[in-house]
Image (spheres, rainbow, N blue to C red):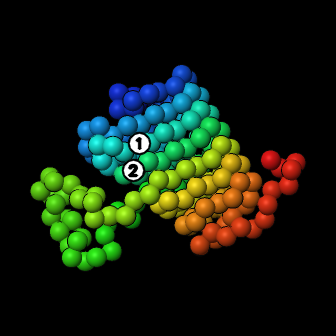
Amino acid sequence: MRHIINSSKVSNLGAKTILSCRIERRRKGGVIQVGKDCVISGLLITEREKSLISIGGNVFVGGNTIIDCVEQIKIEDDVLISYGCLLADSDNHSIHYGSRKNDLADWRNGGGHDWSTTITRPIHIGKGAWLGARVMILKGVTVGEGAVVGAGSVVSKDVPPFTIVAGNPARVVRELDPDER
């Protein structure tokens, strides 16, 4: 049975959109916008007051996918994101031990994470892109319009429009022919 849950946690919700996802707004003010005719499963997280998840229209996000936003994650129209993917616009913790050694204690004491010690960069998924199962999109990546990311790929660099990429790290396999666009 399809149903809408957590709609009160979404700032803008398009018509005929089905939310069957968990939503965590870890700080007041984080914004989630979802366009019309979408099916969104998995987990949407805004970490800070100024976090923005923006999802266009006619977008599918599969179960067990995590979209974890510190800064901004933008997903344009007609995007398919398969099951078990991870989109994270930050490293989540500092690479410096001295900065991260108290992260757990900060969480346990209700203070949350100090995002000023963590590198963040926005993610942008272009119109009509398709992310296969268990894809990871890392901070600062733009996936171009109509691009296809093969299952299990780890994407750490921009993906050109209308290409197929795969692997860890993801590399261009080929360009899509005009009749495949």
Numbered disc 2: secondary structure: loop
Query: Amino acid under label 1?
Result: Leu
* Residue drawn at the location 59% of the way across and 41% of the way down: 76
The alpha-carbon separation of the residues under discs 1 and 2 comes to 6 Å
Tag 1–tag 2 contact (CB < 8 Å)? yes
Numbered disc 1: secondary structure: strand
* Percent coordinates x, y for residue 43 in the rendering: 42, 46
* Residue density around tag 2, few if under 14, some if 14–19, many if 20 or more, within 10 Å: many
Q: Is residue 43 left or right of residue 56?
A: left
* Residue drawn at the location 20% of the way across and 65% of the way down: 104
Q: Is residue 39 above or below residue 123?
A: above
Pick whichever of labels 1 and 2 is earlier in the sequence.
1
- On residue 124, the disc is none
* Percent coordinates x, y for residue 77 in the rendering: 62, 37
Query: Amino acid under label 2?
Result: Glu
- On residue 52, the disc is 1
Tell me, yes or no, if residue 73 can be seen here: yes
* Percent coordinates x, y for residue 44 in the rendering: 41, 44
Image-quadrant location for residue 15: top right
* Residue density around tag 1, few if under 14, some if 14–19, many if 20 or more, within 10 Å: many
* Furthest residue toward right: 179
* Residue drawn at the location 48% of the way across and 39% of the way down: 54
Tell me, yes or no, if residue 84 can be seen here: no
Image-quadrant location for residue 61: top right
* Percent coordinates x, y for residue 151 in the rendering: 63, 62
- On residue 71, the disc is 2
